[in-house]
Amino acid sequence: MTTRSKKAPKKQYYNIPGLFGIRVIVFQNESKLELRHMLGLPRDKFSRLVNVSVRAIAKVESNKEKVEKLQRNYIEVKRLCQALSEVVTPDCLGDWFYTPNEAFQSRKPVEVIEHGEIDRLWDMVYRLNSGILS
């Protein structure tokens, strides 16, 4: 006698034509950029992180249309998240970007990115991976 078990909802991914390395995930009838889904951020917070408008995020997620400005910033933040995942639990990254950090004079990492200083975050990742404390 076979029993039926409920399967976990399946995630579907699709690429955005013209945007290399950017995928949208469809999960439980909701479309989200893959990185936004991973970080667990609402559109407004994610748009600050990748420096595009909330409207641009919505356009990509709902219409599968490319937004040129998204390409570079998205890939840079995605690479940063991959590097940070080696030092910070990936589940905590979304919160980490919005938590004041002493390493940045009590500014939030997202504010550091907004001020065009993402290199400071890369420097921090390098120092953490190298074991350099200061």
Image (spheres, helix red, strand yellow):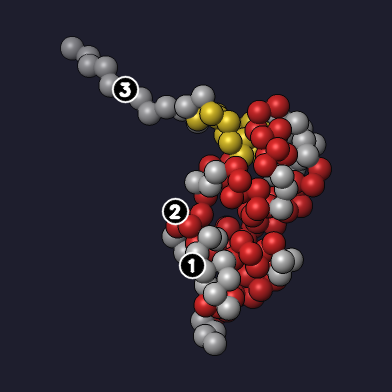
Give the crowd class for mark 2: few <14, some 14-19, many >=20 residues within 10 Å: few
Where's the C terminus, which quadrant?
A: bottom right
Q: Secondary structure at mark 2?
A: helix
Name which of mark 1 and mark 3 comes first in the sequence.
Answer: 3
Residue 27 in the image: state x and y as whole percent: 50, 30
The residue shown at (61%, 46%) is 44
The residue shown at (64%, 54%) is 49
**Which amino acid type is marked by label 1?**
Val
Give the crowd class for mark 3: few <14, some 14-19, many >=20 residues within 10 Å: few
Indicate whether 50 appears above or below 57: below
* Alpha carbon separation for disc pair 3 and 2: 25 Å
Q: Secondary structure at mark 1?
A: loop
Q: Secondary structure at mark 3?
A: loop
Look at mark 1 in the image and give the residue it sits on.
87
Q: Are marks 3 and 2 in contact (CB under 8 Å)?
A: no
Left or right: 91 as drawn, with respect to 53: left
Q: Which mark is residue 51?
A: none
Give the crowd class for mark 1: few <14, some 14-19, many >=20 residues within 10 Å: few
* Alpha carbon separation for disc pair 2 and 1: 12 Å
Q: In the rendered image, is residue 129 in sight?
A: no
Look at mark 3 in the image and give the residue it sits on.
6
Of 93 and 129, the residue lying toward us: 93
Name which of mark 3 and mark 2 comes first in the sequence.
Answer: 3
Spot the residue most to the top: 1
The residue shown at (76%, 47%) is 71
Residue 94 in the image: state x and y as whole percent: 51, 54
